[in-house]
Image (cartoon, coloured by chain):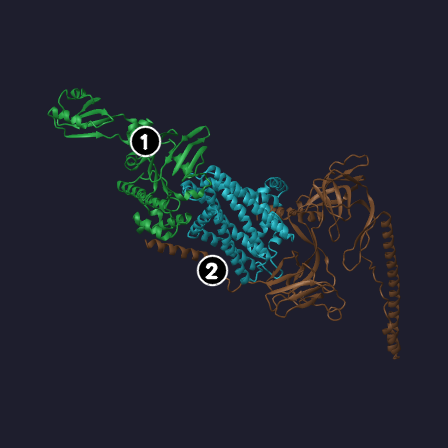
């Protein structure tokens, strides 16, 4: 091989190593911790971004800071590098509505948390003194749990020491030919200390107290500005503030997990949607509550540089429906009810690739393991090409908007009928032309 | 029945007869039906164990990517939520409607130039009778085509186990009401210009402009394009059938039946306004070749 | 039957028709003459309601006519100059007539169509498409369409334009036949010789104005106060014209070849006087004829246009 070709080949092989690192530029950003209907997710609006998007009627947290931003081409999104630069800026937020009236927002100390309830979502925000109280309460619970854990670990260590020494005694006595029955009884009656339960009060425990501008507005278009304490507007801080709200709530969507690709679920969010499947595998369904938001605005609430269509509405998943049931129809057997079950993904044994999904047996084959998924299993096409389903709540009442159909699709044997039907107008045309030609011939 | 209405009925009958003995409509229907067939059969091959997956089929892959790039993933998901039939119906109807509208606009110009309208106007008819007759003929042909395409889609649903559901019938209803207004524009173009080619150019120009404005304001391709289109759309939306059709579809998506019917009613009102303008134009200009 | 009062049509600053008063009587054949651009077509279009007058009134069958009176058009049949052959070429003659029969609500249309097609010798062509018709056949078809609904009056625009002599005769016979049946006929034409033969009255329009409206006889009498008697002799002796001129009733006498042209007053019959004089001169006339003033002469006199350009422009004949 020529030397020049070798050099070129080496350069090409190592080309990625010489690729330019993304350019980081200093930016004034709004750091946003926005509520998205199910939880709080962080995003930021850099200087070039024209607007900030928030959901109406809920507490959202904004801070203003200087940091480095860069565009990450692999994921196509803008990112911050706060490790290198993160300078919070003090001042006042001024929000002006479209009629010209303004409000000033000063920073507040806050924490947020999600208390456990029947449904997952019980988000709360506490400010100032209330935040201190909540944090103190959580700290106390956490402290008590940690103390209980320490005590448990001590007792466990003692128990294990006692067990070990008893085993030694039994062995020695057995070797000596003595009666070990009593000692064995004692050993089997020894119980491990019970581990303390982690605190169950919160789904998401209170976050450490921070300081931010808490913004809770009604739906509309606003102008956002950041002012220093001397009253001057910080350059680059003026933006449009879009506060939007859900159009409809309480819709029901389904996460659809195919049995043959269980790691790649899809969503059936549109209420009138039909699930068309080829019937080659079972479906594992997980119904959830959903709300309808503006496609663009919601996407930008979660990530400020996201794309979306402002002319469209989209159903967004909010939370799972607790203790639901699914009613199935079709198949000639009338209605049947299925319940949510735990399932386990069992890898194929030996050299064979693949897996199968089996019912989770915590006392048997899957003892000591966690279920892979908890869902409703539906076998499409059983007895009927069309399966109807709807979700019922814990009291058995059907949930509006939860109706779906699962239709098994395959190219039919009688498919050539359709192109023949498409040619039917030509047949009609031929008939018409022949009749007219006969008429002309009569003259 | 008034003399003018009666004359319009007779003229419309002849024009419908002429359309039915000409090959053009049948060929357009076959073209539309084959387009529909390609889409419904392609969908069946683009379904896997978890649902509709456009990437499984080249035709749908191109369609999906194109639509997603232009209008976003939400648009594509909503479009195929009930299945392929609403989309297939709309795509099938487009070339058929285009044929009906274009041939009507062109033919009116030809007939007027050749003196046929004048000849009829020597009798108990006038230019408005001819205008109404031509419009009614186009509407009847559109309705006939919609019914043929709907029947085809229902047959496809039975064959492939698709759902011929409310969205398909919404698409058909909106298509018909859109036709009301678009065909009225065809009549207006015929009245405004002096010959068939000019009429056709004007009509296609109007439709293309309104479509570009609609797509521009609907697309997510670029902020500048969308902003510009939105500004223009606000100015022209009141005379755009696509604006009112979009209103109806959005109301339907929002579960608002009154809004849906309202959008359709506005389409009908727009058609009446345009036809009234056409009537005044032909009354003022006369029917002489 | 049709009457207009001070009918005016202006296009911007151009006046196409100025103060026309027409009066077409029931049962007559009325000729409407004028050079190109005189306003004939504009006037006809106003009578038909295709063009709206700028001012003036039109009365059809005693009722005031406006463009809204579509019902009055049922009583009019129109044969335009050119049949729009290029537009409905796919229609058969029967389909074409059936369409108009339905438009005019003709009772028992099949019977009527058949009898009319037979009358114009087109019965054997009823299932032929219009695009296969000759010029003459189209004109007959057009005529048939115009009388399909039994109108009270027919309006014909250049009905024999482009026809061969046989076709001209056929159309002339049709016109006369329809008139004998009581139908009024309004004809706009350049073919002055034909108009002279068939019209009861004529109107002459020039530059938008009505120049004359009367019977042929009255028109000639008003325009020409003298008559000419043409006497053909074997040989005209020298001095004969001068001697003839001395007769008290002779206004002028000239010789053209072997023909004496004797001008006498319009009133009275002077052929006898001339004959007696010639016999007194031992001359035997080969023929004595009074020259009839033609419509063409009257037309030219009234419009003072070059008749040659009228014949070569537009008309074929």
Q: Which chain is cyan?
A: B
Q: Secondary structure at mark 1?
A: helix
Q: Chain of mark 1?
A: C
For residue A169, above or below residue A301: below
Instruction: Report the label total.
Output: 2
Quadrant in the picture for the C terminus of chain C: top left
Q: Check disc 2 and report the residue beneath it.
A: A420
From the top left corner, tell me how far across and down residue A350 is, in percent.
Answer: 66, 68
Q: In the figure, what tint was chain C given?
A: green
Task: Please state which of the two labelled residues, at mark 1 or mark 2, is closer to the viewer.
Answer: 1
From the top left corner, tell me how far across and down residue A392 is, in percent.
Answer: 70, 63
Q: Check disc 1 and report the residue beneath it.
A: C310
Viewer-closest of C301 and A96 = C301
Q: Residue at x 40, y 45 (%)?
A: C87
From the top left corner, tell me how far across and down residue A54 is, in percent.
Answer: 73, 46
Viewer-closest of A238 and C132 = C132
Q: In the figure, what tint was chain A given?
A: brown
Quadrant for residue C278, please give it. top left
């Amino acid at each position: 091989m020529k030397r020049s070709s070798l050099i070129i080949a080496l350069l090409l092989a190592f080309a990625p190593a010489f690729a330019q690192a993304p350019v980081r530029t200093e930016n004034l950003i709004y750091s946003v911790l926005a509520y998205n209907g199910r939880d709080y997710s962080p995003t930021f609006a850099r200087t070039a971004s024209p607007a900030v998007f928030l959901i109406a009627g809920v507490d959202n947290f904004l801070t203003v800071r200087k940091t480095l931003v860069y565009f990450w081409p692999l994921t196509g999104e803008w990112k911050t590098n706060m490790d290198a630069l993160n300078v919070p800026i003090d001042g006042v937020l001024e929000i002006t509505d479209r009629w010209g009236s303004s409000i000033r927002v000063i920073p507040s100390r806050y924490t947020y948390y999600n208390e456990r309830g029947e449904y997952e979502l019980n988000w709360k925000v506490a400010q100032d003194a209330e935040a201190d109280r909540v944090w103190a309460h959580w700290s106390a619970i956490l402290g008590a749990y940690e103390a209980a854990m320490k005590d448990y670990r001590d007792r466990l260590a003692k128990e294990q020491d006692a067990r070990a020494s008893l085993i030694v005694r039994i062995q020695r006595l057995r070797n000596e030919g003595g009666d070990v029955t009593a000692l064995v009884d004692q050993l089997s009656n020894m119980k491990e200390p019970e581990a303390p339960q982690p605190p169950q009060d919160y789904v998401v425990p209170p976050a450490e107290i921070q300081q931010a501008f808490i913004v809770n507005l009604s739906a509309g278009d606003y102008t956002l500005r950041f002012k220093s304490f001397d009253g001057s507007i910080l350059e680059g801080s003026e933006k449009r503030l879009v506060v939007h709200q859900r159009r409809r709530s309480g819709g029901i969507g389904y996460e659809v997990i195919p049995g043959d690709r269980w790691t790649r679920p899809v969503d059936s969010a549109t209420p009138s949607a039909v699930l068309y499947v080829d019937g080659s595998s079972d479906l594992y369904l997980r119904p959830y509550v959903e709300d309808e938001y503006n496609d663009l605005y919601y996407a930008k609430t979660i990530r400020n540089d996201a794309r979306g269509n402002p002319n469209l509405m989209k159903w967004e998943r909010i939370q799972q429906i607790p203790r639901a049931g699914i009613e199935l129809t079709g198949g000639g057997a009338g209605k049947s009810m299925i319940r949510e079950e735990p399932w386990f993904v069992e890898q194929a044994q030996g050299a064979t690739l693949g897996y199968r999904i089996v019912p989770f047996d915590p006392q048997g084959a899957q003892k000591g393991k966690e279920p892979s998924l908890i869902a409703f299993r539906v076998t499409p096409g059983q007895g009927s090409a069309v399966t109807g389903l709807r979700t019922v709540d814990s009291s058995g009442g059907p949930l509006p908007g939860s109706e779906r159909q699962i239709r098994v699709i395959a190219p039919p044997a009688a498919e050539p009928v359709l192109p023949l039907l498409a040619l039917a107008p030509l047949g009609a045309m031929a008939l018409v032309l022949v009749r007219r030609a006969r008429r002309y011939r009569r003259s | 029945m008034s003399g003018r209405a009666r004359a319009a009925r007779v003229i419309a009958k002849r024009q419908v007869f002429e359309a039915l003995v000409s090959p053009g409509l049948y060929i357009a229907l076959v073209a539309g039906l084959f387009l529909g067939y390609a889409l419904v059969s392609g969908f069946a091959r683009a379904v896997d164990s978890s649902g509709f997956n456009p990437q499984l089929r080249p035709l749908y892959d191109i369609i999906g990517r194109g639509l997603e790039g232009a209008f976003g993933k939400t648009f594509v998901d909503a479009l195929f939520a009930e299945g392929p039939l609403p989309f297939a119906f709309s795509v099938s109807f487009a070339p058929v409607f285009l044929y009906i509208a274009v041939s009507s606009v062109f033919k009116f110009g030809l007939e007027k130039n050749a003196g046929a309208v004048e000849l009829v106007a020597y009798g108990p008819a006038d230019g408005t009778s001819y205008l109404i007759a031509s419009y009614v003929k186009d509407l009847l042909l559109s309705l006939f085509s919609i019914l043929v395409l709907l029947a085809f889609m229902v047959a496809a649903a039975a064959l492939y186990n698709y759902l011929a559901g409310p969205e398909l019938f919404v698409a058909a209803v909106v298509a018909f009401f859109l036709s009301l207004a678009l065909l009225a524009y065809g009549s207006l173009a015929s009245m405004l210009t002096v010959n068939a080619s000019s009429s056709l150019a004007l009509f296609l120009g109007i439709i293309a402009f309104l479509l570009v404005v609609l797509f521009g304001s609907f697309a997510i391709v670029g902020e500048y394009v969308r902003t510009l289109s939105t500004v223009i759309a606000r100015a022209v939306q009141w005379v755009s059938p696509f604006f009112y059709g979009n209103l109806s579809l959005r109301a339907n998506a929002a579960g608002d039946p009154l809004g849906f019917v309202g959008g359709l009613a506005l389409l009908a009102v727009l058609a009446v306004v345009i036809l009234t303008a056409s009537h005044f134009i032909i009354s003022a200009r006369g029917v002489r070749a | 039957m049709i009457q207009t009062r001070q009918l005016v049509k202006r296009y911007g600053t151009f006046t196409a028709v100025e103060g026309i008063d027409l009066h077409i009587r029931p049962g007559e054949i009325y000729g409407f003459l004028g050079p190109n651009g005189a306003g004939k077509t504009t006037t006809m279009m106003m009578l038909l309601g295709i063009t709206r007058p700028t001012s003036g009134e039109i009365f059809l069958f005693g009722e005031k006519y406006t463009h809204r009176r579509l019902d009055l058009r049922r009583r009019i049949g129109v044969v335009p100059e050119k049949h729009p052959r290029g537009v409905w070429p796919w229609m058969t003659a029967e389909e074409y007539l059936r369409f108009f029969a339905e438009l005019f609500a003709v009772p028992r249309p099949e019977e009527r169509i058949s009898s009319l097609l037979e009358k114009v010798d087109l019965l054997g062509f009823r299932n032929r498409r219009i695009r296969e018709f000759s010029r003459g056949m189209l004109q007959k078809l057009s005529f048939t369409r115009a009388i399909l609904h039994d109108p009270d009056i027919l309006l014909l625009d250049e009905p024999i334009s482009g026809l061969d002599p046989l076709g001209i005769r056929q159309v002339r016979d049709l016109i006369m036949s329809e008139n004998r049946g009581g139908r009024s006929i309004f004809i706009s034409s350049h073919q002055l010789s034909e108009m002279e033969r068939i019209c009861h009255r004529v109107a002459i329009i020039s530059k938008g104005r009505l120049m004359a409206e009367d019977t042929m006889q009255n028109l000639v009498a008003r325009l020409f106060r003298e008559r000419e008697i043409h006497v053909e002799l074997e040989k005209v002796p020298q001095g004969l014209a001068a001697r003839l001129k001395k007769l008290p009733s002779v206004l002028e006498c000239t010789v053209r070849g072997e023909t004496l042209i004797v001008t006498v007053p319009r009133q009275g019959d002077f052929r006898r006087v001339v004959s007696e004089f010639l016999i007194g001169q031992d001359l035997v006339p080969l023929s004595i004829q009074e020259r009839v003033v033609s419509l063409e002469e009257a037309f030219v006199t009234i419009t003072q246009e070059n008749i040659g350009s009228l014949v070569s422009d537009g008309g074929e004949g």
